[in-house]
Image (cartoon, rainbow, N blue to C red):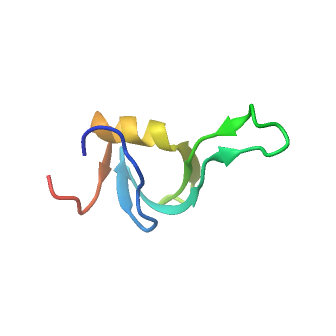
Amino acid sequence: MHGKLESIAIGTLIRDGERVGIIYREIKSGTWTEQPLFNWRTNYEIYYDDGSICVMAGDTLSRLIGINRIEVLGEKK
């Protein structure tokens, strides 16, 4: 996967080092309506096979996939 990650499907399996994880939830980006100067980005909630949970920013996930630190399992290369 090259370039900026637009969106990753819920249920996608990833390999993050020695751990396998599943993208469990997408937390959409938006704007705090009372203070429109505050914006937040899309994050992904990842459940790993060791029982740990991670919330990762979409741009970070995209960058780590782009440099092959995280592998999307089942994706054709």
Q: Position of residue 29 (x, y in %)?
A: 61, 48
Question: Is residue 1 or residue 45 the one in the foreground?
Answer: 1
Q: Where is residue 10 in the image (x, y as percent from the top left)?
A: 46, 66
Q: Measured along the vertical axis of the image, is residue 39 above or below residue 30?
A: above
Q: Measured along the vertical axis of the image, is residue 17 above or below residue 11?
A: above
Q: Which residue is drawn at 46% across and 36% down?
A: 60
Q: Residue at x 60, y 54 (%)?
A: 28
Q: Residue pushed farthest bottom?
A: 11
Picture quadrant of residue 41: top right
Q: Which residue is drawn at 29% across and 49% down?
A: 71
Question: Is residue 35 or residue 63 the one in the foreground?
Answer: 35
Q: Residue pushed farthest right?
A: 34
Relative placement, left or right, of 29 versus 31 is: left
Relative placement, left or right, of 69 versus 9 is: left
Q: Position of residue 52 (x, y in %)?
A: 57, 54
Relative placement, left or right, of 70 versus 11 is: left
Q: Position of residue 5 (x, y in %)?
A: 37, 45
What is the total number of numbered labels drawn onto the structure image? 0
Q: Residue pushed farthest left?
A: 77
Picture quadrant of residue 36: top right
Question: Is residue 50 or residue 55 the one in the foreground?
Answer: 55
Question: Is residue 29 or residue 51 the one in the foreground?
Answer: 29
